Amino acid sequence: MARERVISSKPQPQDRDVSVVSLRPTTLDEMVGQRSVIEKVSIAIQAAKQRGEPLEHVLFDGPPGLGKTTLAHVIAKEMTERPVRMTSGPALSKQADLMPLLTNLERGDILFIDEIHRLPKIVEEFLYSAMEDFRVDVTIEGGLRGRVVNFNLQPFTLIGATTRAGLLGGAMRDRFGLQFHLSYYESTDLATIISRSAAKLGLQAKQDALDTIACRSRGTPRVANRLLRRVRDYAQVCGDGTLTEDIARQALTVQQVDDLGLDELDRAFLTTLIQVYEGGPAGIEALAASMGQERDTLEDVVEPYLLQIGFVIRTRQGRQATREACEHLHLEPPATRPVTRTPSEEPSLFSTES
Ligand SMILES: Nc1ncnc2c1ncn2[C@@H]1O[C@H](COP(=O)(O)OP(=O)(O)OP(=O)(O)O)[C@@H](O)[C@H]1O
Ligand SMILES: [Mg+2]
């Protein structure tokens, strides 16, 4: 994407600066929301500690920015006080990439693999025995035929995170004893999160300003923290530094984030679907091509929230915009909605008819 997207739930470079890193909760008690997940994680941790065993392998799935990485850090702190070993699916292209990580693990350490659905098959299969028996068989080339050497590993906990649970094979999934789905946060929880963030940043903020930001954060703590910082900038430059509701509204208007937290890209998605594809159904590839966007961006960061708030539905024929979406954008709902239209009958990608 050419433009920085302020409500993107994907991590942005500025999220890594010191102030934001320190906004991450470090203990389970500091985590806000996701009550049922936190409770189950907490019980599993206590039970494992009482038995003196490492925690079972954990899988977190859910849209970006809801706290999967944060939870991995928190679990590591609660279990071992040692830092998490972090890696990600795309960074591991062969067995040899994983070996140093595995062999350096101490008993009870946490290995975190982000985007685990993007692990190459060969690495995934190599991981199976590591997860199940804490050993790996490595084939060493040389001589007439390869030699198989097996390495014993220290018992460890693998925490996998994925934004696309559907792309994870059953064999991998079944090896996780604990599986949790993170869902979008209630806006009251987001208001609590940013009120703590404001305190950490030394900001004076009115409750109604925090509520306004929370309502426009599309259920996502990462977005809420980012909007808070944009509003802080605005308050500093255009106000007296205090976050009032007025300042929050003005700042969010400048950022083109609307009442529901939708930004230009969300609106472009809906407008394309409604005007170019007469409300749909339209395939994701066709939509991506019409908008000049990556399919992954649409599927990972745009669509999940639009589905969640009922602005888009997915049918076998493709994506369809709902009446609520048309109303929100003040667009006329398409007069006829051919729900049974097959993908081959979709309008041409370059059609501009509305
Ligand atoms: N439950 C929570 N309470 C308070 N803050 C939270 C919570 N969950 C997440 N955050 C904040 O949101 C930010 C994003 O969380 P995190 O990086 O863990 O998301 P993620 O699910 O790993 O996203 P991705 O899929 O993009 O990797 C964190 O920096 C943290 O400040
Ligand atoms: Mg993450």
Image (spheres, rainbow, N blue to C red):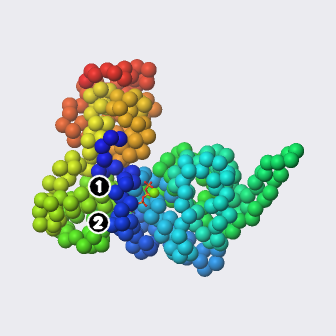
Residue at 37% of width from left, 53% of height from top? Answer: 12
Q: Indicate the position of residue 104 as horizontal and vertical percent values.
A: 65, 66
Q: Which residue is mark 1?
A: 217
Q: Is residue 288 left or right of residue 327?
A: right
Q: Secondary structure at mark 2?
A: helix
The kind of residue on which mark 1 rests is Ser
Residue at 20% of width from left, 33% of height from top? Answer: 331
Q: Is residue 57 left or right of residue 253?
A: right
Q: Above or below — where is 42 with respect to 138?
A: below
- Quarter location, residue 19: bottom left
- Quarter location, residue 291: top left
Residue at 17% of width from left, 50% of height from top? Answer: 253
Q: Indicate the position of residue 211 as horizontal and vertical percent values.
A: 22, 62
Q: Which residue is mark 2?
A: 194
Q: Above or below — where is 81 with respect to 259?
A: below
Q: Indicate the position of residue 76 as horizontal and vertical percent values.
A: 53, 70
Q: Secondary structure at mark 1?
A: loop
Q: Quadrant of the N terminus?
A: top left
Q: Are marks 1 and 2 in contact (CB under 8 Å)?
A: yes
Q: Is residue 270 left or right of residue 122?
A: left
Q: Is residue 151 left or right of residue 343?
A: right
